[in-house]
Image (cartoon, rainbow, N blue to C red):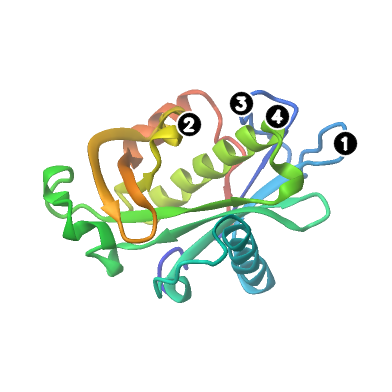
Amino acid sequence: MDLFSRRVYTLTMDLRQSAPTVQKSAEVARDRMGCGVKFAIATGEKRSSALALQNLVYSEALGHLPADGLDADAVFLVAESSAHEVVASIRLVGPAHRPFDFETQVDLRRLVEPGARAALVGRLCVVREFRPARKSIPLQRGLLHFMVKAADQNSITDLFLYTYESLVRFYRVALFENTGLFFRHSDWGFVRLMRLRVSHALSKLESSNELDAVTGK
């Protein structure tokens, strides 16, 4: 797996904030209940935990996890609790796997420039204890913002995801744009296609200092 192999990143945030304000300390931020989180690209046991979380969440919601054969080569970004447990994850499938499944119905040439390096993100999962809105919303936004920094450092120009109409507003807050395109997915039914322009999103996040604590090792 060559995607994101050059660097590993971590980021900390404090879930007391209504938005994912990042702490500048190298230590994991904690809230009043000791539920600080750290974001990282999952390797080893953390990657196994991300896969297990994905299977658990989708099995609970759908009765099964739809298999697309992409997990082995995908990158998983995770949020770790102060107890070093994976509490949220998201999957990123790199440009080498284009055309993505939705490209049989949507022509990406309408949306990206020639030579663009587009990636597909999805399967955002959160453990039950972190699903109340006061934790879940800033946690998920923080994970998505961390993904923007990691994507930029690995020359990804555009991130795409498909989601239900009810979640479009959430992803717009996380800097995804509604492309206005929708299609019927074989597993998910009718979904909207959304796009995040990495350079545009990074500029917004850096101007708000939300990524000050992202560091490379």
Identify the mark nearer the N-term, 1 or 4: 1
Extreme-right residue of the structure: 33
Q: What amino acid type is highlighted by mark number 4?
A: Arg
Asked whether the residues under the numbered discs 2 and 3 touch, taking CB atoms below 8 Å apart as contact, a structural biologist would say: no
- Residue carrying label 1: 33
- Residue at the image point whose x is 51% and y is 43% from the top: 144
Identify the mark nearer the N-term, 2 or 3: 3
Query: In the image, which is nearer the foreground, mark 2 or mark 3?
Result: 2
Judged left or right of residue 19, residue 31 is: right
178 over 73 or under it: above or below: above
**How far separated are the C-alphas under marks 2 and 1?**
25 Å
Residue 41, position as x, y percentages in the image: 57, 59
Q: To which quarter of the image does residue 44 belong?
A: bottom right
Residue 191, position as x, y percentages in the image: 33, 45
Q: What amino acid type is highlighted by mark number 3?
A: Ala
Identify the mark nearer the N-term, 2 or 4: 4
Identify the mark nearer the N-term, 3 or 1: 3
The label on residue 134 is: 4
**How far separated are the C-alphas under marks 2 and 3?**
12 Å
**How far separated are the C-alphas under marks 1 and 4?**
13 Å
Judged left or right of residue 86, residue 181 is: left
| Mark 4, other Cα within 10 Å: few <14 / some 14–19 / many ≥20 | some
Q: What amino acid type is highlighted by mark number 1?
A: Met
Q: To which quarter of the image does residue 46 belong?
A: bottom right
**How far separated are the C-alphas under marks 2 and 4?**
14 Å
Q: What amino acid type is highlighted by mark number 2?
A: Phe
Number of numbered discs overlaid on the protein picture: 4
- Residue at the image point whose x is 51% and y is 23% from the top: 208
Q: Secondary structure at mark 3?
A: loop
